[in-house]
Image (spheres, rainbow, N blue to C red):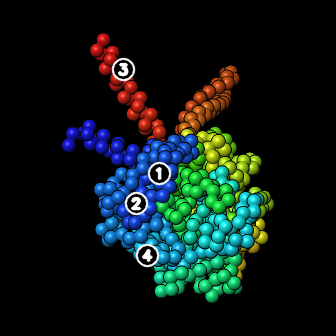
Amino acid sequence: MNSKLSLAIIILSLLATFAVFPRIILAEKTSVTIAVDLAHGESDKYLAYIQGNITEVTVAGKTYQINWLNITTSISSDLLANVDILLIGQPRVSLTPSEMDAIMNWLKKGNKVLYVAGDSDYNPGQTTINAVNKFLEYIGSKLRLEQGAVYSEVNRTYTYKGVVYPTVAASYYRMLAFVEPDPSPFLRTEILSEGLSKPILMHGPTCIIWVDDQGNYRDPVNDTYPGLIRIAWFRNSYIGVNYKEWMPLVYDPLLYGLGAPMDNSSFVAYAAEYWPISNVVITVAGESLYGDYEPAWASKYYGVDLDGPLFVTNLVKWWISIITMQRTEVLAFLDPLGDDNGAGTLKYPTNPVFKPGVFDLVKFQVFTDDQNVYFRATFKDLGGNPWIGPNGWSLQLLQIYVLTTLRIMPNTTAPGLNVKIYPGWHYLITATPGWGDTPWPDGEVSALYAYNGTLIAKEGDKFDAYAIPEVNAIEVRVDKSLLKDVENIADWVFVVAVASYDGYGDYKVRAVQAGDPAEWVLGGGDPLAILNGVQPRVVDLLAPTAEDQFKMLKSYNIDKKELATVFGLSRMGLVKPVETPTVTVTLTETRTTTITSTVTQERTTTATVHYTTTLVQTSTQTTTKTVTNTETSTTTVTVPDMTTSIIVGIIALVIGLAIGYMLKKK
């Protein structure tokens, strides 16, 4: 293979290894096609009004053109090829298996909405209930229509948005429904009730129930499941039965009938089911928004002012907001399954609410759209919401420490977790269940803090925390205006820590004790670490491996009473202190000393002659002596990493060769 080509392939491979390529979650659309089924005995009453008035809608500042398509023949894959939303309003004839297969395959494509409406069991409504329930079962939805009817009395009222309204329009079967959707910031259910101040009409309806995986029929008023969204309600009502061949599946008339103990109950009039993997919404209603004896589009009925047109418009806007959601996944990190035991020894409290896996972080993702940044932590099991936390969860305290690329001295503390953060953080996001109005840590409302301890935001318009039970996740939405350096978000560093939430605990973190756990206390702590105040209170930590997590959470020093240090995670991996290589150099010092000595000897000789003479003889002897003294000392010297030097040398060599080549050409 050509050497240049090989080098290019290697470079591209390295880039692919380290680069983060944003992934578009859902594609943007500028027009939406809504198909209306008229092939199964449905009436088209008010349909022309609906299609003539809803020609475009604006969602989140973007306008979408509505293309309407009426289906008058058998439903097929070809007919559904370009359809985004399918309305099946009160079918009198069952769909065929081939039609249901076509709809199933259409739903599998994702980003779709299916609306199905029913009727009461007043003849021929029982055929509609049967047709709809068989269809919902076929496509895999849990939603069902109750086998019966919902009624109320003309003298009953309900206060809706501060105004007292009757529960019926002049007769027991002309039911009024009140749009009060379950809050879901992720699915933006607030759109459904925007601007509404009056009820909507549902003429002779049934209500919504659901069926669990074991085939048991359930009451959605008191028993919900992940993905269920209750949209509109009948209030102060009761159950009636018209078709004598059956009985209601959930609401026994002996309990819920007129004058029975559960008379004056609430029932679900509209409900939706969200399928997160394919981004599909199934909406089921007890009566139709078109084609009914008097459809939900009605703006006034028997003297009662209604918000039917606005509700139907809101419903279309909500559906479009879901199928056109556009998010970019900037970062995604997987966390090992089953490492929800701190440093390897922690044990869950013994109360049954602490189901296995409720603290087991399995994934962390960062998304962006035009206006917000979304931080999502997914768990093995969110554990439901046993204490009815306003944000949709009860058991977890999630802390997300964010280090940006800004050159600002970061904070290294971890409030309540009893660890240190390296390399520190510029933003701290704390997601809590959400009781009250006071932000964490004094209160129980989620909060966003800056590195200097300043509260940037608590839950509100620009900052919000909520559960996504469909995927066992907690998500935090932060308006981009609250954050700096968002343009470099792919280079941010994160520490994501999960603790057990305790409203009475220090910093709302559940305590850890040595030995076995107690009903409300984690067990398995290190007794010496607890005694010396260095026991981490982290149950799970975002880390590449369980061993990485255990090592970090065990890094405390009992003797020095130093807290454990946990490292941030970036797209390149764990961010640890740079380890400068240590080289041991032996220095040998040789000293040579020259010593010169001069010795003078004097000798006197005396002789007796006729005269006396003294002879003095002087001799000088010079001796040179060389002494070599060798001293060896060992010194530890820290030298810089040679990689940089080598790279600089190579660059200099290349530049030199280039200059030389140019001079040679001259």
Q: Amino acid at mark 1?
A: Ala
Compared to residue 591, the image places residue 655 above or below, namely above
Which numbered disc, 3 or 4, marks the residue that appears first in the sequence?
4
Residue at horizontal 61 percent and vertical 34 percent from the top? 597
Q: Which mark is residue 646?
A: none
| Circles 2 and 1 in contact, beta carbons < 8 Å | no
Find disc 1 in the rendering and name its residue.
48
Query: What residue is disc 2 on?
Result: 37
- Secondary structure of residue under mark 1: helix
Say if mark 3 contacts mark 2, CB within 8 Å. no
Q: CA distance from mark 3 to mark 2?
A: 77 Å
Q: Residue 61's quadrant in the figure?
A: top right
User: What kind of element bears circle 2?
Assistant: strand
Asked if disc 3 and disc 4 are in contact, CB closer than 8 Å, the reply is no
Q: Which residue is mark 4?
A: 127
> How far is the residue under mark 2 from the one under mark 1?
14 Å
Seen from the viewer's position, the closer of residues 159 and 449 is 159
Which residue appears at 32% of the width and 17% of the height?
A: 662
* Residue kind at label 3, given as amino acid type: Ile
- How many numbered marks are there? 4
Category of crowding for the residue at label 2, using alpha-carbon neighbours closer than 10 angstroms: few (below 14), some (14–19), many (at least 20): many
Disc nearest the viewer among 3 and 4? 4
**Residue, disc 3:** 659
Looking at the image, which is closer to me, 628 or 96? 96
Label 1 crowd bin: few (<14), some (14–19), many (20+), radius 10 Å: few
In whole angstroms, how far apart are the C-alphas of marks 3 and 4? 89 Å
Q: Residue at x 69, y 65 (%)?
A: 390
Query: Image height check: is 74 above or below 261?
Result: above
Where does the image place residue 278, in percent across and percent down from the top left? 43, 60
Q: Secondary structure at mark 4?
A: helix
Tell me how far mark 2 sits from mark 4, CA to CA: 17 Å
- Which comes before the other along the chain, label 1 or label 4? 1
